[in-house]
């Protein structure tokens, strides 16, 4: 765990219930979790254990049915949808297994989208986007659409888009799940470098090797935390 750092994430007694017909399924049950700033945390566990549901709540893509979620001293559970969206835009970056790039847009245009939504000046947008793509080793792919890029290149574009607003935390859901081993390792190298620069990284993964690269591992089973361990150096 990241010693001496204040807690960026504080979750208290968080519940999430889904309805299946007349049945109520508790996907998360009374979850308590604290994550210090600068942490590299892997969320692990079997399918259906609640990992992605927790990540969606952390990313303000979903609301808990009970409990509280504080992010960077902001009590998010008391915010309306508009204010939550503003927090999400400025503090959270997302990296998904299937990239979620806009097919008709170039790499440059995909990365630029968050800046457009935030109202950043066009000249400043172009400068920041080109610098970011160059830093991720794909400066020569700025005018390529997703279907003209390899899987590893697409994920680099996705990470560039996730970090262009300089977020406090990156949430990665199986970021290597759609990549070969070499490309996956390259992507994790990039995420680790971002974490070393101070960005908190929370990652869902089924891959034990990938989990070992995290500083801290949480094992979830049936919507509860069954294990919380620091990775040995």
Image (cartoon, rainbow, N blue to C red):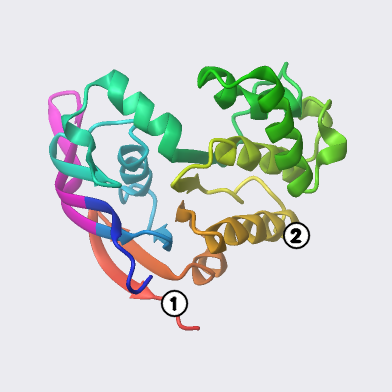
Q: In the drawing, what numbered circle is on residue 231?
A: 1
Q: Quadrant of residue 14?
A: top left
Q: Regarding mark 1 in the picture, which secondary structure is present there? A: loop
Where residue 112 sits, quadrant-wise, is top right
Q: Nearer the viewer, residue 35 or 231?
A: 35
Looking at the image, residue 20 lies above or below residue 64? above
Taking depth in this image into account, of 191 and 25 the one nearest to the observer is 191
Instruction: Give the crowd class for mark 2: few <14, some 14-19, many >=20 residues within 10 Å.
Output: few
Q: Position of residue 29 (x, y in %)?
A: 15, 49
Stretch of the chain drawn in magenta = 11-33
Camera-near label (1 vs 2) is 1
Which of the two labelled residues, at mark 1 and mark 2, occupies the earlier sequence position?
Answer: 2
Residue at image position (22%, 22%) is 80
Residue 157: quadrant of the picture: top right
- Whether residue 159 is visible to the viewer of this picture, yes or no, is yes
Magenta span main SS: strand
Look at the numbered disc 2 and give the secondary structure of its residue: helix
Whether the magenta-drawn stretch holds residue 49 is answered as no
Q: Which quadrant is the N terminus positioned in?
A: bottom left
Q: Is the residue marked by circle 1 packed among few (<14), some (14-19), or many (20+) residues within 10 Å?
A: some
Looking at the picture, how far across and down is residue 99, in whole percent? 61, 35
Q: Residue at x 88, y 38 (%)?
A: 140
Q: Which residue sits furthest right?
A: 140
Q: Residue at horizontal 69%, vertical 49%?
A: 179
> Badge 2 is on which residue?
182
Q: Nearer the viewer, residue 68 or 146?
A: 68
| Residue 209 location (% of width, % of height) | 56, 69
Image check: 70 left or right of 215? left
């Amino acid at each position: 765990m990241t010693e001496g750092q204040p807690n960026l994430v504080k979750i208290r007694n968080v519940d999430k219930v889904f309805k299946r017909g007349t049945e109520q399924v508790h996907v998360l049950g009374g979850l308590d979790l604290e994550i210090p700033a600068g942490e590299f945390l892997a969320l692990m566990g079997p399918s259906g254990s609640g990992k992605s549901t927790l990540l969606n709540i952390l990313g303000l893509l979903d609301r808990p049915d009970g409990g509280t979620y504080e992010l960077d001293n902001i009590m998010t559970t008391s915010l309306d949808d508009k204010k939550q969206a503003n927090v999400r835009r400025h503090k959270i970056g997302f990296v998904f297994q299937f990239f979620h790039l806009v097919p008709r847009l170039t790499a440059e245009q995909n990365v630029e989208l968050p800046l457009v939504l935030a109202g950043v000046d066009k000249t400043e947008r172009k400068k920041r986007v080109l610098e970011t793509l160059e830093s991720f080793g794909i400066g020569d792919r700025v005018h390529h659409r997703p279907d003209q890029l390899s899987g590893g290149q697409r994920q680099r574009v996705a990470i560039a888009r996730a970090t262009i607003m300089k977020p406090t935390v990156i949430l990665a859901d199986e970021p290597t799940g759609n990549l070969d081993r070499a490309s996956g390792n390259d992507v994790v190298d990039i995420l680790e470098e971002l974490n070393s620069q101070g960005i908190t990284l929370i990652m869902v993964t089924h891959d034990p090797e990938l989990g070992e690269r995290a500083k801290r591992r949480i094992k979830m089973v049936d919507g509860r935390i069954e294990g919380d361990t620091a990775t040995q150096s």
